[in-house]
Image: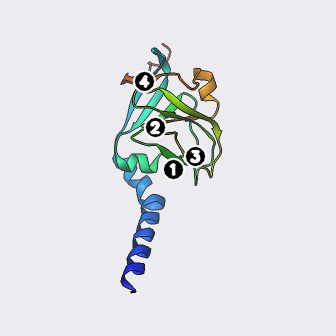
Amino acid sequence: MTGLPFLIGFLCGFFVCLVCIGAPFLARKGERVPMRLAVDGVPLDGTRCLVASNFVLRLAGLLNHASFATGDALWLPRTASIHTFGMAFPLDVAFLSGDGVVLALHVPLSPGTRLSGPPGTKHTLELPAGSAARLGLKVGTVVTLLDRFVASPSGA
């Protein structure tokens, strides 16, 4: 009788520790691959999109970040729901199909919110607040990842 409640409590405590303490630390060990984005086939040369390439990076997301720079984005593959608990800034969030079609757009999403995408959501794109309008994102827009992002040399 005491075994199952203890196990459930232990697993819940472990998960909370992983999310709050372990995930941001472990995420630094992984690789966030910088890529370029295209919207409706047009490359966005000034936008650097980091791809959370593994479970720990997706779990950590933008936790432990003080801000989210204009021109940055975070692509969360195989992610259909997100939260902004513990974040200090709002986001624009696009839920995407497997082909990159924007199924739903939430602008801006305030800190302390939990949100799930509509049926068919395969990926999530997080952007600094105001970026969706600047990039022309709307429901039906197609967002794709291109090749690796390479920063322009200064002065070029």
Query: Which labelled disc corresponds to residue 144?
Result: 4
Contact, CB < 8 Å: mark 1 with mark 3? no
Q: Nearer the viewer, mark 1 or mark 3?
A: 1
Residue 113 percent across, percent down from the top left: 61, 50
Q: Residue 90: x and y, percent?
A: 63, 42
Residue at 49%, 46% (x, y): give it. 81
User: Alpha-carbon distance for marks 4 and 3?
Assistant: 27 Å
Label 1 or label 4, whichever comes before in sequence order: 1
Disc 3: CA contacts within 10 A as few (<14), some (14-19) or many (>=20): few
Q: Nearer the viewer, residue 49 or 144?
A: 144
Residue under numbered circle 3: 66
User: What's under tag 1, amino acid-wise?
Assistant: Leu
Whichever of labels 4 and 3 marks the residue nearer the N terminus, that label is 3
Per the model, the C-alpha gap separating discs 2 and 3 is 28 Å
Q: First in sequence, mark 1 or 2: give its number.
A: 1
Residue 67 visible here: yes
Name the residue located 37 percent from the left edge and 50 percent from the top edge.
56
Amino acid type shown at disc 4: Thr
At 51% from the left and 28% from the top, the residue drawn is 102
Q: Which residue is mark 1?
A: 63
Q: Amino acid at mark 2?
A: Thr
| Residue 60 in the figure: left or right of residue 110 | left
For mark 3, give the secondary structure: loop
Structural distance between the alpha carbons of marks 1 and 4 = 24 Å
Badge 1 crowding class, 10 Å Cα cut-off, few under 14, some 14 to 19, many 20 or more, is: some
SS class, disc 4 = strand
Q: Is residue 92 above or below residue 54?
A: above
Residue 29, numbered label = none
The 10 Å Cα crowd at callout 2, few under 14, some 14 to 19, many 20 or more, is many
Comparing 142 with 148, the one in front is: 142
Q: Is residue 117 left or right of residue 22?
A: right
Looking at the rendered structure, the kind of residue marked 3 is Ala
